[in-house]
Image: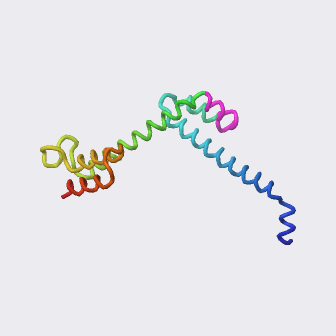
């Protein structure tokens, strides 16, 4: 079978529809996994509530996902933000611990530590209060 015959048997519009169907399947699975993750992450549901939602989402996928999004969709975003804040706090705490500084006064015991100064400097840069050049100069001065 030559390529011309293949192009006639499978026109461009069919290729478009196939790609659209593939995209929608990937989107569906992403949404399904997101909802299952949210069910287990939710602290306001008990064990039976989580089991019920999970059975509904797995046994009746289309209806279950739509009902879940209608009933609990607003709180999904709040739980995502909460999880991101907890992760960020854990990373910051780990960085401070790994740098060997105590939150109250640093390794030397008096005044702020280099890590605290660098953290404040990074916050200023993120807020746009200082430029990249000012950030680098201040960082070099702190580390010197």
Q: Looking at the image, which residue is at 83% across and 58% down? A: 11
Magenta: main secondary structure equals helix
Residue toward you, 38 or 2 = 2
- For the rendered model, the colour scheme is rainbow
Q: Position of residue 84 (x, y in %)?
A: 43, 41
Q: Residue at x 29, y 52 (%)?
A: 135
Between 14 and 72, the residue placed more toward the observer is: 14
11 displayed left or right of 127: right
Query: Magenta stretch?
Result: 56-70
Residue 10: % across, % down: 83, 60
Name the side, left or right, on which 86 lies relative to 1. Answer: left
Q: Is residue 95 above or below residue 44?
A: below
Q: Nearer the viewer, residue 45 or 30?
A: 30
Q: Quadrant of the N terminus?
A: bottom right
Q: Residue 117 location in percent, x, y?
A: 23, 47
Which residue occupies the extreme bottom position in the image? Answer: 2
User: In this figure, what is the number of numbered marks?
Assistant: 0
Q: Quadrant of the C terminus?
A: bottom left
Residue at horizontal 48 percent and vertical 38 percent from the top: 80
Q: Tell me if 106 is positioned left or right of 10 in this view.
A: left
Q: Nearer the viewer, residue 32 or 135?
A: 135
Residue 65 in magenta? yes
Residue 111 pos. (x, y %): 14, 43
Query: In the visual, does 87 lie left or right of 18?
Result: left
Is residue 81 on the magenta stretch? no
Position above or below: 6 against 61: below
């Amino acid at each position: 079978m030559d390529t011309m015959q293949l192009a006639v048997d499978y026109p461009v519009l069919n290729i478009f529809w196939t790609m659209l169907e593939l995209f929608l399947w990937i989107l569906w699975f992403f949404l399904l996994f997101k909802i299952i993750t949210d069910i287990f992450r939710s602290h306001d549901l008990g064990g039976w509530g989580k089991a019920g939602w999970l059975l509904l989402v797995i046994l009746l996928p289309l209806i279950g996902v739509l009902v879940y999004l209608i009933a609990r969709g607003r709180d999904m975003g709040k739980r995502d933000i909460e999880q991101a804040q907890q992760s960020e706090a854990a990373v910051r705490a780990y960085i401070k611990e790994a740098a060997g500084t105590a939150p109250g006064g640093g390794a030397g015991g008096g005044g702020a530590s280099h890590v605290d100064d660098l953290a404040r400097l990074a916050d200023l840069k993120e807020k746009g209060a200082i430029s990249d050049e000012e950030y680098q100069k201040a960082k070099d001065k702190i580390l010197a």
